[in-house]
Image (cartoon, rainbow, N blue to C red):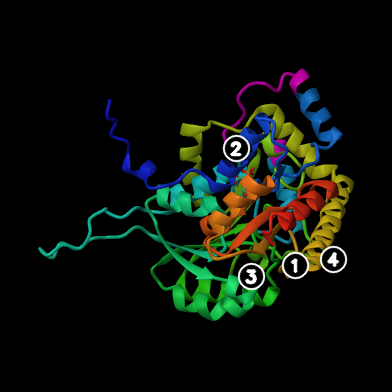
Amino acid sequence: MDRDFAERVTRVEPSATIAISNLAAELESEGVDVVDLSVGEPDFDTPENIKDAAKAAMDDGATGYTPSDGIPELKDAIVEKLHDDGLTQYGTENVLVTPGGKQALYEVFQTLIDGGDGRSPSASGTSSRSGDEVVLLDPAWVSYEAMVKLAGGSLARVDTAAHDFDLEPALDDLAATVSDETELLVINSPGNPHGSVYSDAALEGVRDLAVEHDITVISDEIYKEITYDGREATSLGTLDGMADRTITLNGFSKAYAMTGWRLGYFAGPEDLVEQAGKLHSHSVTCAVNFVQHAGVEALQNTDESIAEMRDAFAERRDMLVDLFAEHGKDVPVPEGAFYMMLPVREDDQAWAEEAVEEAAVATVPGSPFGTPGYVRLSYAASRERLREAVERLAEADLL
Ligand code: PMP
Ligand code: GLU
């Protein structure tokens, strides 16, 4: 049967990060020993106290639906965390708890972005309207683009790769790209896939443009706790003029090694939370009940586990930078998150395919992030596996 799929789904490709990780898993199931540096997932298990909190909550009967926007204890704990980060504008009425940060982003895009009318300009002079404009800083995490497209929005992109993935020197390009037509801008610091932490001066530049052009900014802070060398990632919403135009997005996957639990949230203006809440209640209903209780524990009692993971990631980063340098490869040194951009040849897709087929090392090509000529490595893997990956790539003449 010829199925007529909705145009909105045929506009997007499957997630490149997830596709490569599935491929790696498939090869592994065939007996190939793949070093999988593709998907962004901590290799640590969830801290015991978080697991215990989930088990206790389940035993206590936390198995039914919860209020759609989240259990009060978790919303209180989130507000406390946001206040600790200097985001004092948020109260519980500004928070929506979601099954994963991805769902939070999806709901925000669906709530704010209007699609165009799909018509192209015609000779008859009928004017066409394109979808609301969203500006991304490249390289940008693959799902932003897909979510904008699913909402029918249009994309404008600013390249930071040419500036060593730094935002400050790219501010002029950003200023030339945004306009009064821009609806949303997405900032991700520390960032996936580049690992950069934006300076306060860069964020102030973003603020000035957002205020000038009346733009709402999504600040994706899912890697906020993972920074190195004493660096801290400033939350955009703490800047003067940004309290009411910032949507702060976060999740438990990365800092607390809780990828499979699916828990995240966003905090934003109350009217946005109300509108997004409709979409939320008609689709996912709520995040999983006992998982939300585990989230309270994660926010309140995991400073030590976070510090241990952060130190391990920092050591691995240093080791990888040194190993690549030994092979004559200069890589931009990430300041946060657990990703590294490795410069390869222009055809990064072909390089990544060769790396899997000839060296059994899985990486994600830079192109889907908007940055051809690079691949992304996730160094959330053991030191032995990282060393093995570099050796294999060198042996296959890929460095
Ligand atoms: N934002 C960024 C930048 C990410 O890398 C991810 C990773 N998946 C997410 C949001 C969403 O993560 P999750 O849905 O697991 O909370
Ligand atoms: N964010 C992670 C990554 O970039 C997990 C996979 C995904 O959701 O894209 O690899």
Q: Secondary structure at mark 2?
A: helix
Q: Residue at x 68, y 42 (%)?
A: 75
Q: Name which of mark 1 and mark 2 comes first in the sequence.
A: 2
Disc 3 marks a residue whose amino acid type is Phe
Mark 4, residue position: 230
Q: Residue at x 70, y 41 (%)?
A: 34
Mark 2, residue position: 22
Q: Name which of mark 2 and mark 4 comes first in the sequence.
A: 2
**Answer yes or no: do the residues labelled 4 and 1 have beta carbons within 8 Å?**
no
Q: Quadrant of the N terminus?
A: top left
Q: Marks 1 and 2, Cα distance to the nearest angstrom?
A: 28 Å
Where residue 225 sits, quadrant-wise, is bottom right
Disc 2 marks a residue whose amino acid type is Asn
Label 4 or label 3, whichever lies nearer to me, is: 3
Q: Name which of mark 4 and mark 1 comes first in the sequence.
A: 4
Magenta segment's dominant SS is: loop
Q: In this picture, is 298 found above or below 160?
A: above
Q: Residues within 10 Å of mark 2 (few under 14, many from 20)?
A: some
Q: Marks 2 and 4, Cα distance to the nearest angstrom?
A: 35 Å
Q: Please give the range of residues in magenta.
A: 58-74
Q: Residues within 10 Å of mark 4 (few under 14, many from 20)?
A: few
Q: Name which of mark 2 and mark 3 comes first in the sequence.
A: 2
Q: Secondary structure at mark 1?
A: loop
Disc 1 marks a residue whose amino acid type is Val
Disc 4 marks a residue whose amino acid type is Gly
Task: Find residue 333 and name its label.
Answer: 1
Q: Is residue 321 left or right of residue 209?
A: right
